[in-house]
């Protein structure tokens, strides 16, 4: 590609809505452009890298025995009504009607369509196992699209679905995908962890997220260096300390104090000079539209997933919908504006995390505007309906498996493997005949990779203050050839020859033949992130040499013109091997 004829519009300024580095750099280096919130165009360079990621995924999927298909993006409502998700998927599902008034949606995922496909054309156990995948555009009307490609509304996903006769077969299919995902992440050069993840209310037993480690990740992960247990904090098992406060603890007299306009724990704790760990954080949730109070220590975070499974056990039935109460609902339950809720005098069930059990002389909201209570003690000042493990795991917590202290990381979820069981095959009546001629529901797994999210994740892990540093496997071009003096015929001839010979050697090369200041072109090359750079200058040429530099290295070397093509081709081959 000759940059003079290319379409690589680089920019000096960061986009105003960019909060993370991948978003800034992909826009500035001309890889993507926003069309609407969470909806992006891939420019020529961006699309080359996307296709390389897709190709790596495709190779590993094919190698693991999966078969590529391509399903429609537009899906009829009937199938979603059969699975029950037309009602339950919520507003992330973009629904619309065709000219005849029939309901459709834009596919956010394809369990319904694939199960329909398979139930119609698979009838015998002999056709199993089957794993079908596609690489395709998905649409999810995310409430908060952000971080550029990381959380888009329209994005590219690789989704795969496995079908087996029984659970043992399905778990084997799961393991094959688990291994393939490892290989894909390795080939893309990620520093990543496969973490145990929550299975939600699908009822499956196995689920792993592939998390790329990055400070900007939206997910929190804990891992135990002692036993290697790694999990999303939502799921992580911690050894809970359920001990009660000491019997001889000196309990203070509960006292009301004024805390004008101080709502957050931070504000109140600074104002009252009490540590956050002394606070009884009181959160009002709506569990199937009924208010409940959840108490966690001020320095802890409530875990909705754990709360949900705790309630299921405690109440003896599943809670369909658990959500934070609205301001009006908080007022209704506490008679106070948001920020002043406390457990004293509440007429709703009060569930407390185990850490509250050991708390002595806590601080809580007084259920009164601008008022808090100090020296609050449960059992004396208020009753707890039931205690449970209700909080997010965090750094330093004792690992649920071995007791060792957890390390904490942030992660970007680039992939998800999920054992589904018969949830969809039961709902859509997808069965096969087994060896005895008996009908059995297909046992399924589903496996997603965020292709475009991966592109962003690669940039998050591979950049410096000057721009992107592509790993060779996904760089839009391996090398840029940079003539310094575009008016100098000798320089241009040498640059053109190197450009031609590199292409002949199978190297993907860009020639920056633009008639611009060298300083400007160097800045662009760093921003764009070509892994290798060859600079052709009049002075070096006189000695028969060109300058070679790898984007990751700070120093450059002079190499004979006659040797440069072999040198670069060798490095590229080595990196791609
Ligand atoms: P998240 O928790 O990040 O919303 P999810 O659990 O909804 O993800 P899945 O339904 O498992 O995601 O989708 C499979 C993969 O698709 C995810 O692992 C992620 O890499 C990617 N993905 C999901 N939502 C988005 C999005 N809004 N933008 C880009 N990629 C996405
Ligand atoms: Mg999601």
Image (cartoon, rainbow, N blue to C red):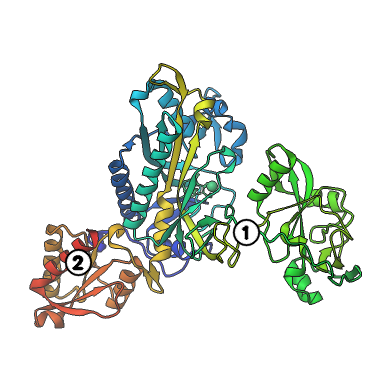
Distance, label 1 to label 2, CA atoms, is 49 Å
Mark 1 / mark 2, whichever is N-terminal:
1
Mark drawn on residue 571: 2
Residue located 36% across and 43% down the image: 176
What is the crowding at mark 2: few (fewer than 14 residues within 10 Å), some, or many (at least 20)? some
Please state if 165 lies on the left or on the right of 401 as rendered.
left
Residues at marks 1 and 2 touching, judged by CB atoms closer than 8 Å: no
Task: Where is residue 95? Give x, y as percent.
Answer: 56, 34
Q: Residue furthest top?
A: 437
The relative height of residue 502 versus residue 536 in the rendered view (above or below) is above
- Name above or below for residue 84 compared with residue 26: above
Relative to the observer, which residue lies in front, 449 or 535? 449
> Callout 1 environment at 10 Å: few (<14), some (14 to 19), or many (20+)?
some
**Mark 1, residue position:** 239
In the picture provided, is 411 more to the left or to the right than 184? right
Q: Position of residue 324 (x, y in %)?
A: 72, 50
């Amino acid at each position: 590609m000759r940059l003079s004829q290319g379409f690589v519009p680089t920019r000096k300024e960061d986009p105003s809505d960019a909060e993370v580095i991948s978003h800034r750099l992909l826009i500035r280096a001309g890889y993507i452009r926003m069309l609407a919130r969470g909806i992006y165009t891939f420019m020529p360079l961006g699309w080359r890298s996307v296709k390389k990621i897709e190709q790596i995924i495709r190779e590993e999927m094919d190698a693991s025995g999966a078969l590529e298909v391509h399903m429609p993006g537009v899906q009829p409502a009937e199938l979603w009504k059969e699975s029950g998700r037309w009602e339950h998927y919520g507003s992330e599902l973009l629904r619309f009607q065709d000219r005849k008034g029939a309901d459709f949606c834009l596919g956010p995922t394809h369990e319904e369509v694939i199960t329909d496909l398979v139930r119609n054309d698979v009838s015998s156990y002999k056709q199993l196992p089957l794993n079908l995948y596609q690489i395709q555009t998905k649409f999810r009307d995310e409430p908060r699209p952000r971080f550029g490609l990381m959380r888009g509304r329209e994005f590219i996903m690789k989704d795969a679905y496995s079908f087996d006769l029984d659970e043992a077969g399905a778990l084997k299919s799961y393991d094959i995908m688990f291994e393939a995902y490892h290989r894909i992440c390795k080939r893309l050069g990620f520093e990543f962890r496969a973490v145990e993840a929550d299975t939600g209310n699908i009822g499956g037993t196995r689920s792993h997220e592939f998390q790329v480690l990055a400070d900007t990740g939206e997910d929190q992960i804990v891992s135990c260096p002692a036993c290697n247990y790694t999990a999303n904090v939502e799921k992580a098992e911690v050894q809970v300390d359920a001990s009660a406060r000491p019997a001889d603890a000196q309990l203070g007299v509960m006292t009301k104090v004024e805390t004008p306009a101080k709502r957050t724990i931070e504000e109140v704790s600074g104002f009252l000079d009490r540590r956050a760990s002394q606070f009884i954080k009181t959160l009002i949730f709506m569990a199937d539209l009924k208010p409940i109070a959840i108490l966690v220590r001020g320095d802890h975070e409530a875990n909705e997933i754990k709360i949900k499974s705790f309630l299921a056990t405690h109440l003896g039935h599943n809670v369909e919908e658990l959500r934070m109460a609205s301001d009006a609902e908080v007022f209704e339950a506490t008679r106070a504006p948001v920020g002043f809720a406390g457990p004293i005098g509440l007429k709703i069930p009060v569930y407390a995390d185990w850490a509250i059990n050991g708390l002595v002389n806590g601080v809580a909201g007084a259920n009164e505007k601008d008022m808090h209570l100090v020296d609050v003690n449960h059992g004396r000042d208020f009753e707890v309906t039931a205690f449970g493990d209700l909080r997010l795991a965090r750094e330093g917590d004792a690992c649920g498996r071995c007791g060792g202290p957890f390390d904490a990381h942030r992660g970007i979820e680039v992939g998800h493997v999920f054992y589904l069981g018969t949830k969809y095959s039961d709902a859509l009546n997808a069965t096969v005949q087994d060896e005895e001629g008996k009908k059995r529901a297909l046992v399924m797994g589903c496996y997603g990779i965020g292709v475009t999210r991966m592109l962003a994740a690669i940039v998050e892990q591979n950049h410096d203050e000057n721009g992107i540093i592509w790993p060779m496997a996904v760089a839009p071009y391996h090398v840029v050839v940079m003539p310094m003096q575009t008016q100098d015929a000798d320089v241009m001839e040498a640059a053109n020859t190197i450009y031609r010979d590199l292409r002949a050697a199978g190297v993907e090369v860009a020639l920056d033949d633009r008639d611009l200041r060298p300083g400007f072109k160097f800045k662009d090359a760093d921003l764009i992130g070509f892994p290798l750079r060859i600079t052709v200058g009049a002075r070096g040429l006189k000695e028969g040499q060109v300058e070679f530099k790898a984007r990751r290295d700070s120093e450059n070397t002079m190499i004979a013109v006659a040797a440069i093509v072999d040198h670069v081709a060798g490095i590229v081959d080595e990196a791609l091997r």
